[in-house]
Image: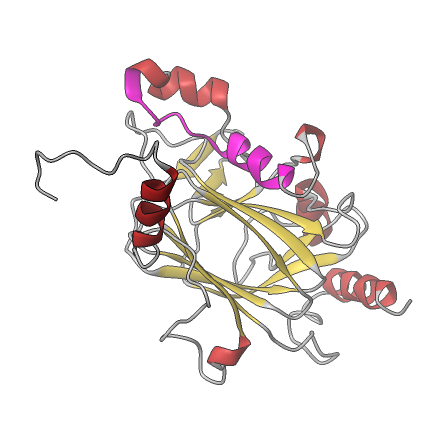
Amino acid sequence: MTANSPGPTLADPIAAKEHARSLGSTLVESMPILPPRADDLPEGVSQDDLIWEETIAAGGYAIRRINRGGRLRLIDLKGDACASLQIFNAEMPTERLNIADTVKVQWNGYFGVGEGKARLFLSDMGRVLMSILEDTAGTHDGFCGASNEELSGAKYGKGEKKGRYFLNTRDRFLLGVGKHGLGRKDVHPCVNLFKGAVIEEDGSITPQIGPFEPGRQVILRAEMDLMLVIANCPHVMDPREEWTVTPLRATAWRGPITPEDDPVRNHTPEAYRAYLNVEDYYRR
C-alpha cells in the first residue's frame, strides 16, 4: 500500500476481518505481553513464575489481580512516570487502601526502604495490603491524592484546545474499578509512586516531580489477595505547564507469603500487629 493509496474498506466485514488479523503480531511501546515474559527478572525468579508483564502508556491505566505472596515490580522507564495506585482486598473490595491509617499507624507519611521510611500500605481493617521490598526511587507521595478532570482541564485545557492531554488519574481509576463492578464511591485516596511530596514546617507542600534518572524501580509484595488499579497520569501538583508523563513498566510474579521471621513484618510493633491481623484473616 503506498502513502497515497486508500486503506482497507473496513465497512466490508471480510476486509475488516483481514485487516484486524494483519495487526495480530503488531508490537507497540505500551502494551501487555501475552504470555508474559521478561529477560531481567531478579535472581531466583523463573519465567514460569511470571503472571504479568505490561508497559502502561502515558495517560494509561491497568487493573490486575495479584495473589498473596506475589511481587509487583514497577519501573519508571524514562524518569517521568507517576504510578498512582489503588489497592483492594480481592475477596472483599470494601476493604481497600486507607492512606490516613497507613500514615497514622506507622507514624510516618514518607514511603520507601531507607531509615525513617514507612514500608507498609494498610487497609482500614488494620491489615497489611502490600509492603515495599525494594526502592531505588525514594520519591513517593501519600499526601496529595489523584488529579481529576476539573483540575486537569483547568490547567492543561479541554479537548478542543489540547486534544487528549487532560487525561487524569481519577478518570483512569473510574475506568479500572468499573471493570469489576465498582463505581465512583469505590475510588479512594491513592498513593503516588515515583513522584514525591514533602510537607514543610509551615504546612506547605513541596512537590518532587523531576524528571529523574530513567530506570528507577520499586518492588512491592502482596500480603493479601489483591485487586490493583494503576494509573499513569501527571501528578496533581506537577508545576509544568505542559501535560507530561512517560511510560511505566509493570512486571509481576508469584512468590512465597511472608514468613514469621521476615524483617519487614518484625520491623516495628505496629507492623507486627498488622501482619498478625492478616494471618488471623487467612486462618479462617
Q: Is residue 201 in sight in this rendering?
A: no
Work out which residue is located at the far bottom of the displayed protein and give it: 44
Q: Using residue 80 as the reference point, say whether residue 118 is left or right of it.
A: right
Tell me residue 133's x, y (percent): 55, 68
Tell me residue 270's x, y (percent): 75, 60
The N terminus - image quarter: top left
Residue displayed at 68% across by 57% down: 226
Q: Using residue 97 as the reference point, say whether residue 278 is left or right of it.
A: right
Instruction: Establish if 7 lies above or below 254.
Output: above
Task: Report if residue 170 lies within the magenta region.
Answer: yes
Q: Nearest the camera: 16 or 42?
A: 16
The C terminus - image quarter: bottom right
Give the magenta part as a residue range.
161-178
Tell me residue 136's x, y (percent): 41, 62
Count of numbered circles on the image = 0
Instruction: Establish if 116 lies above or below 80.
Output: below
